Image (cartoon, coloured by chain):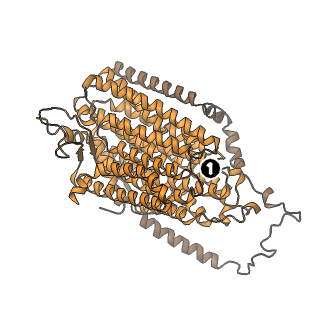
Amino acid sequence: MSLLIEAGYEFWNPIIWLIAFAVLMALVFLFRKRGQAKYKKDTDQTRIFLCGEEVPEAEQRYVRGGNVYWGFFETLKEYYNGVVRPHTGVVNDYVIWFVAVTAISAIVLFIVELAR
Amino acid sequence: MSTLIAHSSILIIAVTLATAFLTPLVGIASKRARNTLIVLALAFVAFLVVALARDVMLNQIHVYTLGAAAPDLTIPGGAIVPVRIILEVDGLSAFMGIVIAIVSLVAVIYSMSALKTETGQNGFYTLLLLMAAGMFGMVFTGDLFNLFVFLEITSISGAALIAFRTKFADSQEGGFKYIVVSAVASLMILFAIGLLYSQYNLLNIGALAATMEYTMLDRIALVILMSAFVMKLGGVPLHMWLSDTYSVAPASIPALLIVASQASLYALLRTSFTLYGVTLDQSVAGWIIIIVGLLSMFVGVTMAIRQTDITRLIAYNCVCESGFMLVGLGVGLAVLADPGALDAFGTMAMNGAVFHMINHALFEGLLFLVAGAIFYRIGTRDLNQMCGLGHTMKLTSVLFLLGALASAGIPPFNGFASKILIYESVYQFNPILTIIGILVSILTLAVFMKVFFSAFTGASLPRYRDVREVPRPMVAAMIVLAAGIIFFGLFPGLVLDWIVQPATDALVNQGVYIDAIMGAVP
């Protein structure tokens, strides 16, 4: 019984990973400690500066979930047109898919049997 | 103790069922007494499951014949085939029992706070316990007809739980879709069982496997069983009902629905590895499962990344994660008849897939509970309406991040441990599968970064400034799953040795399952 995964050329020891991660975090902490110490919370240092313009309210200045990865969806528009279409939300369609998949699986199985 | 273990398989089902029917009676007298009864009963059931699993790991298979003079008397005197209802628990059944016990207990604890203000709680807990009993029955039963019966119990109670919040129209629609899909799948399974029974006059899986001739009717039954179980587990292209139903159920129920899907995956494995086993054309069946798995991974993740409803997004991610399990198990099935390949990578691929089943239940369950916690506090599932919740729900955001990283296969969490087993073993079968798997994992990370960015980061919106963490029982339930994610991630070797490897061995060794039933035949 071992605490790690080791089989063939697979090897994974999370404890070694954790130690490496802790060392890295310690280094990050050390670098951070050497940084500017004059930070003051809730002063002009922490307020948003927008070229002197008035900063919009929080409600207006965040990217909504629906807009994230816009470019990804725009690039894959054709793929999404095809893949979204079957997701009709109509349960009758889901049952038709079941019938189709069963029929295709049966045909594949029988063709392979005949080929042998 | 040995008597308790000898009767444990039936006790697990009976105690859960009895508690289900006691719950409304006790609930009339006192809510507190009802809640205590449910938690104690499920804790006792969990204890029995662990004791049974330990016994199975140490002493091989556990057989329980209902109504026989002795539990292991599978074939009555004068008969040559088993005729009674038989429960048969091997490594895989015990593994599934552990998953069901953990998630049921967590779901109950979470629900006690999450549904505190809802009416009809007595009915809710009765249904939840019925669903748990159905799932235990599915994974412990040794015969096909009882598999169908327990599948029905699971499906009907699941549909009622999805539609529980009748004030929401989409919940009722989700419940309706679930029951239609489940009824179609169940009826087709019953038809396939009928085909097998008409030829062999047998319903016991072990006895059927021993006499299976792989006739034309057997092949038709196989195709129907596989399609029906793939639909129930949500494999592409039969997955479309899954996001419509998981997303509208009360927060704790999707965690249970995931386990119900896995019980269907268990039934698929029992059918292909144990019932058909060596008679099956494993290469073709294996490749069909691999293709369904690949489609599930890719379509699941690309649909998930597009969603703006947090629970629909997680539901599509469930489809994707099921794909990883199917690919691992498909590779194992494809090389089952080749001992060299099975030793070199087939067993490891199945280990990865089985390990991923319990990991999936933990991290996906946690993600659903977090989504439920967000809905509990702000009353919306729409990511477009969320922003900056990390300011006020710090613990919830950390728990979400933990589940998300585990799902994306980031070390040192449990998802990484199972995915690396799948990647490396599947690579030796076909490198393309591993490349697709890694690409899908990267996309999974992108999916959850979208949620984390939209819901938890950014400025604190004025309307959410008063939002607080959810009540303690809900947090406790999430922490239990998070602890499982960390433990399974840090000590994957222990989990592999104790519960995963025996489950994989049970899949590979069809003869052991058959001998446990037919051993008495001269």
The quadrant where residue A30 appears: bottom right
- What residue sits 46% from the left and 70% below the top? A19
- Amino acid type assigned to the residue bearing label 1 in the image: Ile
How far across and down, in percent of the image, does residue B141 sit? 31, 41
Q: Which chain appears orange?
A: B
Nearer-the-camera pick, B115 or B228: B115
Q: Residue at label 1?
A: B310
Q: Residue at x 20, y 46 (%)?
A: B71
Residue found at the far front of this picture: B29
Q: Secondary structure at mark 1?
A: helix
Looking at the figure, which quarter contains the N terminus of chain B? bottom left
Could you tell me which quadrant the C terminus of chain B lies in? Answer: top left
As displayed, is residue B56 above or below residue A97?
A: below
Judged from this view, the residue extending furthest toward the right is A53
Q: Nearer the viewer, residue B372 or B79?
A: B79
Q: What letter labels the chain drawn in brown?
A: A
Which residue is more in the foreground, B68 or B470?
B68
